[in-house]
Image (cartoon, rainbow, N blue to C red):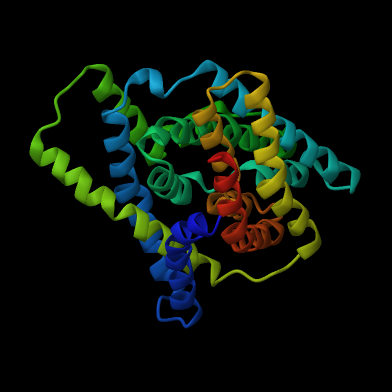
Amino acid sequence: MLEIFLKVLPFFGLIGLGWFAGWTRFFPAEASAWLTKFVFYFALSAMIFRFTATLELGALFDPAFFAAYLAGSTFVWGLAFAIAKLRGRPVTEAAMEAHTAMIGNTGFLGVPMLVVLLGERAIGPVLMVLAVDLIVFSSLITIIITAARHGRVALGPIALGLVKNPMIVSMAAGLAWAGFSLPMPAPLAEFVAILGAAATPGALFAIGASLADRSAERVGPALWLSGAKLVLHPLAVGLAAWGLGVEPFAAGVMVAAAALPVAGNVYILAAHFGVAPARVSTSILISTALSVLSIPAVIHWISK
């Protein structure tokens, strides 16, 4: 356990460094926004493209894995939605709380960290988790809020949002490259390797810097949502993976990915729609702080 904690510690050290730079205003909010944009559109996209372009296509889609992660995540989503409704929250807030309870920071934290900690075999499972979160659940929250407010759903903007997401585009481009068995010219391979190498430190530093601007409000609901994300979500997908006979290593990666803290892009959605941004922001803050201990525990457990 201590050995795994020490392996994880440098990743959270980078988050802590980013937080300190943001807290002291040496790295102001505008700088954090621009660094996040660089990582999102360039560095992380290069890393994902490099991973997927060299993958066997079968490694990126396992029907049992897909079904298990979708089933476990849907259970957590439905439970969080039901609890929010029992507390008297409107549909839009209940949907946002449900989204918060099961969308982890797979892009900025999971892809860089889990591949290093668990090895390159983790690439396919991590990207499957990312694809389900982006395509299925991000579309679902948009549809529910739009329908609740306007009584109709415009699928065009949702499809456009998916097409404009650089993580989806880079994944699709890499899969096309692998599907056509295209050779990777040495200069291109070196280019994406250098650019992609900036994703890990850049993403972790940006997470920390963004946390410096968050304050703890609506702590009660945020504690429940953080617990759902860090404990209930990995437990639910783990049980689903066991029930559907997912290969043990892939199931372990799924559980580790589900144990990641709440993703920063959930706050972007909450702020964009004006739905429970304080609750979401506090959930990100609490879950990220607690994950310093919970993630090593989960990785220790799945490594047995």
Image location of residue 241, percent across then percent down: 62, 26
Q: Which residue is at 47% across, 75% downward?
A: 22
Question: Which image quadrant for residue 254?
Answer: top right
Image location of residue 211, percent across then percent down: 54, 67
Image location of residue 186, percent across then percent down: 9, 37
Q: Which of 141 and 75 is in front in this view?
A: 75
Q: Which residue is at 51% across, 36% downward?
A: 253
Question: Which image quadrant for residue 79?
Answer: top right
Image location of residue 119, percent across then percent down: 38, 40
Q: Nearer the viewer, residue 2 or 138?
A: 2
Question: Which image quadrant for residue 91?
Answer: top right
Q: Is residue 105 above or below residue 210?
A: above
Point out the image quarter for the N terminus: bottom right
Please indicate, yes or no, whether residue 127 appears anywhere in the rendered image.
yes
Point out the image quarter for the C terminus: top right
User: Could you tell whether 283 is left or right of 167 in the image?
Assistant: right
Q: Which residue is at 40% across, 76% downward?
A: 27
Q: Is residue 211 above or below residue 87?
A: below
